Image: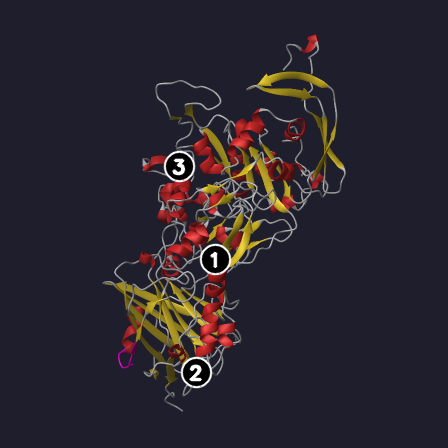
Amino acid sequence: MTLVHNWHLGRRMEYPYFESRPKHQFAAVFNINRCIACQTCTMACKSAWTYNKGQEYMWWNNVETKPYGGYPQSWDVKTLKLIDNGENTWYTDEKDEKLSPYGVYEGDTIFEAAAKKNINQWAVGYIPEDKEWRAPNFGEDVAKSNKPDEYSSLPEHSRWFFYIQRLCNHCTYPGCLAACPRKAIYKRKEDGIVLIDQKRCRGYRKCVEQCPYKKPMYRGLTRVSEKCIACYPRIEGRDPLTKGRPMETRCMAACVGQIRLQGFLDDNPKNPVTWLIKHDKLALPLYPQFGTEPNIYYIPPRWAPRSYLRQMFGPGVDEAIDKFMVPSRERLAVLSLFRMTQTIIFEYKIEEGPKVFETTIHGKKFELYNDTVIGLGEDGQEVVRTTVEEPVYIRDPKHYNSI
Amino acid sequence: MKKTYSFLKRYGVALLSSAFLSTALFAADEAPGVKGASDEEFIPAKEVLTIKYVDVGKPYHLDVETLHGFFNDAKGVTVPLQKQDKAFPNGGGSVNNAEVKAIHDGLTVYFKVSWSDPSKNARAIAVQEFRDAVALMFPLGAVEITPAEHFSPRMGDREKPTNLWHWKADWEADLLVKGELEDVEAQYPNMHDDFNLNPYSAYYHRELITSVEVLSGGRAANNLLSQPWRGRSVEDLNAEGFGTLTTQDHQDVNGCSKYDDGVWTVIFYRSLITNDPHDVQFVPGGTSYFNMAVWNGGEQDRNGQKNISIQWHPVTLERVAWQ
């Protein structure tokens, strides 16, 4: 094992390989508050990559209802149990803006739990059986009641559920990559996408076992494992539509609810994804305690119980929800970029506009400015321009009855 | 403290090995997750397997029933097997030994391996199911294996390549499906219908389902595991150390098997000499070594989770009758 730095955990942790970060990392921000679980993302992925024989049960992208849903069933609860040592807590008194923005995780990661338990493999895990994959939307829209005698009250509801949109996290320290005994899994240096070499894979299913998010899947027909490939031909700009510029994946581009923004995590503070994740800390990693440094980030739902959300997204939840409920001027502008283009935005610019509205939300003053946000592509050219206030179009009376 | 612990964990084995063993060559090559080997592993077993010359003729069927009679006069060796406990992931330990017999007829060499396994696992289609398998390993080229000349009995070493013959129970089952792969319907007969209620499920419209071309990364990348029409149950591979196992471009080994009363019997056969430089070559009158491993699918054995022999076993080939 070597020691690598995991900024989600705010500390160094053990991992079988050295720290090696890509030039820029495939990443995305999902706004859970806006998702309606229409599964358009799920079907966009299915119809692109997993419609074939032997892939019937595979959903590289899926949307499940929390707390009861899970694909495969109870994947998160089972893995959380495996790393539970009774003191999986966070030390949040001291934070370092860069190295430990959420504090320090004091429990075990999947790698450390395996070393402690002396099970002679790289990470703890389990292989979900076929029946656990079979009902991908089991538990859909089933609410949990915390206080059965009371009805909803904001900010947290007493009856609640929310949707979580999941695909491969293209982790910085992938459990699947660590698990593979023959190095058939690799992380691309150029964009951090994690892939299974279909020639070297021998279907051992160690990746299925040791990925905590259960996103590598075994294909019985070809006897090897497959996983989300982050639509890499689109990322490489090989789709003619974006004229050679990197293009968002199928699941991102298809999002009807406009909850998704994809990009690359880098050091540019004016990159919308980097800004939301690292500077504003509005978007949080999914189960950071697993220790793989996942790269899909979520704006947590404001109505769900905080203790549940803290377990799922770490200690940054309260701050993120406060920020989301009363968004700042810049935050509102960046959030307006979601789903405005399928060309990947590398940088944003804001042109200030007039103040159009002000109010008080939970005792805090909120002002709305109709700023114009401009998204720039990889080449620095403008790829999208939008305003914070959606423009209103009034239909001409002669078209009132036209469809 | 953690750093010191990690340093010791990573380099401790290497340091100890260098101190106690005359050569530190193999220790320096150690990867994380791999424990050093003891010196005894570099001493080949005493018992020699004689590959007996038997005139097999031209058997009409190359199956276990036809071939096993030819092994009657061959003297076998019993190879002790144990858990693989050196390279991550460790595992195995459910099969204690296997019996190996070998014959040749001047053209073809036959190795018969039998071991007891209470469960037959001849399919690897469901995500939680693993196949039974057995592999023979031979050092490539003319080598002398002594404690002074380290040649790892575990998958070989860098610059010390091995040739492996890997028989798989599910490949044998695939052969019965007109040389095709066993399809997903073999595992899930009513997969095209919900709730398994329809007695005339879409499975019977096989033409319709098979008319759609299978798109697969594994097939496109020519992964032999994914290919239909491979027409054999034994894979011909090379390795030079843990994690280096690679399928050969040219497949030369065949096999047949029988599972009866809790005992697997597998016969590997290949011509004594091949054109492939990556293959082990057998010369009547010559000597070589072999080692082996058994996978018990019922115990979720695969890759390093296997029952292995930790010693090379010498083999000699009897001269042919006309020599």
- In front of the other: A151 or A142: A151
**Which circle, 3 or 2, is nearer the viewer?**
2
Badge 1 and badge 2 in a common chain:
yes
- Give the chain of mark 2: B
- Dot 2 surroundings within 10 Å: few (below 14), some, or many (20 or more)? many
Point out the image quarter for the C terminus of chain A: top right
Residue numbers of the magenta segment: B72-78
**Which circle, 1 or 2, is nearer the viewer?**
1
Residue B2 tag number: 1
Q: If you read the primary sequence from the N terminus, does the residue marked by circle 1 or circle 2 appear first?
A: 1
Q: Which residue corresponds to the image point at 59% horizontal and 29% vertical from the top-left?
A: A258
Q: Main secondary structure of the magenta part?
A: loop
Asked which quadrant contains residue B54, the reply is bottom left
Q: Amino acid at mark 1?
A: Lys
Which residue occupies the extreme front position in the image?
A: A93
Residue holding disc 2: B145
Asked which quadrant contains residue A70, the reply is top left
Would you say residue A141 is visible in this rendering? yes
Q: CA distance from mark 3 to mark 2?
A: 55 Å
| Residue A143, horizontal then vertical, whole percent | 40, 26
Residue A135 tag number: 3
- Give the chain of mark 1: B
